[in-house]
Amino acid sequence: MFDLKKKFFVITGAFKGNGKVIANNIIKNNGRVISIDKKFLNTSKSKNKMLFKCDITSSSDIKKLFANLNPKIKKNIYGLINNAGISINTKDLYDKKSFNKTLDVNFLSTLNLTNEICKIFKRNNKGSIVNITSLGSKLGFTNNLSYQISKNLLHQVTKSQASDLGKYNIRVNSICPGYIKTSMTNLSQKNKIRSKKILSRTLLGRWGKPQDLAGAVVYLLSDASTFVTGSEIVVDGGFSIKGL
């Protein structure tokens, strides 16, 4: 049920961290990956993985990427993982520059990508979209307003898109990670006081790893979840449900 059957899956932010690990696990489950990140030095291709240097905030870059794909590959794309994200901490309640940049990467780019890839999904009469949100979509954190708003928008658009796209047999779900050990959380990891607070609230008593997200992603891309849409899987070690 979890075999990805040599289908292609597009993932953003795949240069490192969660995206890279998720991409590798798709391949381990017999899938093929089209990895997108502006940090790739150039475009490269192998049997199971295609790496594209691409700025996801540029609609022209996105259109060009899909236009230049081999038609046989395009017909075999059945999934999209909107994983790319940035976080810009600021004590200002509204810093226009950081706010707009965060929304561009974390939210607006997902709309462009979804719009383009759904043209393929509709022809295939099948597709699965996985949006990576955050605890910031649920809880209040300090000095990070733009990030939390962007992830909350992505959480809500998951339900809206699931409603719009169900008639085409396109499923849309989200995964909400907790504190995962990546470069984005480096400062929190190194801050002993903050890290201790995070661990004290996490029921499983440890930081998450990118590998912890991979199983949930593969599940939502595979035939094991063909009746799941508009849903959210929380992968946070119990952080968000701990009481007193």
Image: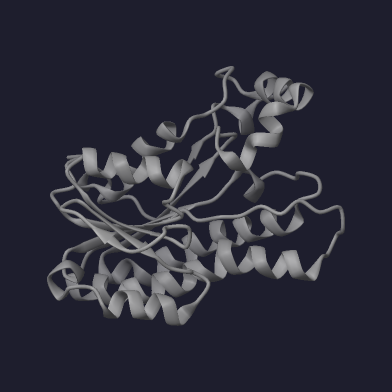
Relative horizontal placement of residue 2, taking residue 11 as reference (left or right): left
Whole-percent x, y for residue 105 in the image: 57, 64
Can the viewer see residue 173 in this picture?
yes
At x 47% / y 63%, what residue is drawn? 38
Q: Nearer the viewer, residue 155 or 100?
A: 100
Q: Tell me if residue 35 comes above or below residue 206 in the rendering.
A: below
At x 37% / y 63%, what residue is drawn? 42
Dividing the picture into quadrants, the one containing residue 196 is top right
Whole-percent x, y for residue 47 in the image: 15, 53
Whole-percent x, y for residue 146 in the image: 72, 59
At x 42% / y 58%, what residue is drawn? 40
Can the viewer see residue 219 in this picture?
no
Q: Tell me if residue 224 comes above or below residue 50 in the rendering.
A: above
Q: Nearer the viewer, residue 211 or 119?
A: 211
| Quadrant location of the N terminus in the rendered image | top left
| Quadrant location of the C terminus in the rendered image | top right
Which colour assignment does the render follow?
one colour
Q: Residue furthest front?
A: 41
Dividing the picture into quadrants, the one containing residue 139 is top right
